[in-house]
Image (spheres, rainbow, N blue to C red):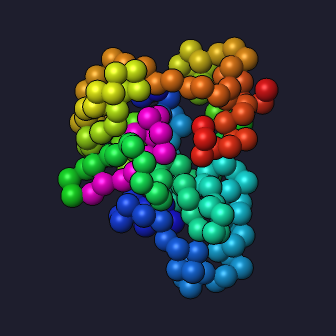
C-alpha cells in the first residue's frame, strides 16, 4: 500500500489490494492499520490517508523529481521526504500571511527551520477527527 | 517538527514497519521538547 503511494502519489484501491492478497487479508490488514492510526479509511471504504500521504488534493504538496504527493498537513510535508528518504521541494501556504511556503529538503537536511506549525488540537484528541486535525 | 518527523516517520516505508507503542510516540514528542498536557497522547 505504501509502495503504491510512494510510486504513484495515490493509494491502491481496496479492490486492487484484495486482488493481490485476498479479500479477507486485505480487509483485516486495512482495519489493523486503521486501528493503529496509520491509515484512515474514507466513508467509501477506500484509503483516505496513509500518514503522511493524502489520497485527496490538499494545500500541501511535496515534489521530488517527476514525482509528487499530497500531504495531509504542514507536518506531513516534512514527514514525506523523511519517510521516502528523498530530496524534495515543499509547497504550501503560511497561514498568517498567505505567502507561499518554499522549503526544500536536500541530503536529509531542511533548507530552513524558520517558521511555525500551529497545532490547534491537543495531542490526545488528534484522532477524534484526524481529517480536521 | 523536522526532527520529530525523523523519529515519527523515518521507518514508515520499511517492509517490516510496525506502528510504535504510544509510549514510544510520547517519548519522541518529549525528545523534541513537546511536553505538558497539550502534547499528552493519552489525555
Q: Is residue A18 left or right of residue B6?
A: right
Any part of residue B35 in sight: yes
> Which residue appears at 65% of the width and 28% of the height?
A121
Q: Is residue A76 magenta?
A: yes
> Which residue appears at 42% of the width and 54% of the height?
A57
Q: Is residue A14 left or right of residue A2?
A: right
> Which residue appears at 67% of the width and 82% of the height?
A23
Q: Quadrant of residue B2?
A: top left
Quarter holding the C terminus of chain B is top right
The answer to which of A132 and B33 lies nearer the viewer is A132
The answer to which of A97 and B9 lies nearer the viewer is A97
**Residue A4 at what x, y percent from top left?**
43, 67
Q: Is residue A109 magenta?
A: no
> Which residue appears at 61% of the width and 51% of the height?
A38
**How many labels were placed on the picture?**
0
**Residue B17 at what x, y percent from top left?**
57, 53
Q: What range of the chain is rendered magenta?
A: A67-77
**Residue B14 at what x, y percent from top left?**
49, 54
Identity of the residue furthest to the left in this view: A65
**Residue A52 at what x, y percent from top left?**
49, 47
Q: Quadrant of residue B42?
A: top right
Any part of residue A85 in sight: no
Identity of the residue furthest to the right in this view: B43
Amino acid at each position: 500500500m505504501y509502495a503504491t503511494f510512494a510510486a504513484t502519489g495515490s493509494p491502491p484501491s481496496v479492490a486492487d489490494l484484495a486482488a493481490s492478497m485476498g479479500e479477507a487479508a486485505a480487509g483485516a490488514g486495512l482495519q489493523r492499520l486503521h486501528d493503529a492510526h496509520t491509515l484512515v479509511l474514507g466513508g467509501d471504504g477506500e484509503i483516505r490517508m496513509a500518514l503522511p500521504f493524502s489520497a485527496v488534493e490538499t494545500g500541501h504538496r511535496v515534489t521530488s523529481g517527476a514525482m509528487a504527493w499530497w500531504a495531509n498537513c504542514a507536518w506531513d510535508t516534512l514527514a514525506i521526504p523523511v519517510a521516502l528518504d528523498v530530496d524534495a521541494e515543499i509547497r504550501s501556504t503560511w497561514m498568517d500571511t498567505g505567502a507561499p511556503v518554499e522549503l526544500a529538503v536536500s541530503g536529509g537536511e531542511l533548507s530552513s527551520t524558520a517558521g511555525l506549525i500551529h497545532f490547534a488540537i491537543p495531542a490526545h484528541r488528534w484522532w477524534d477527527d484526524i481529517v480536521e486535525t | 517538527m523536522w526532527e520529530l518527523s525523523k523519529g515519527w516517520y523515518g521507518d514508515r516505508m520499511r517492509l517490516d514497519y510496525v506502528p510504535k507503542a504510544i509510549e514510544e510516540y510520547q517519548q519522541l514528542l518529549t525528545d523534541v521538547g513537546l511536553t505538558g498536557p497539550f502534547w499528552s497522547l493519552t489525555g
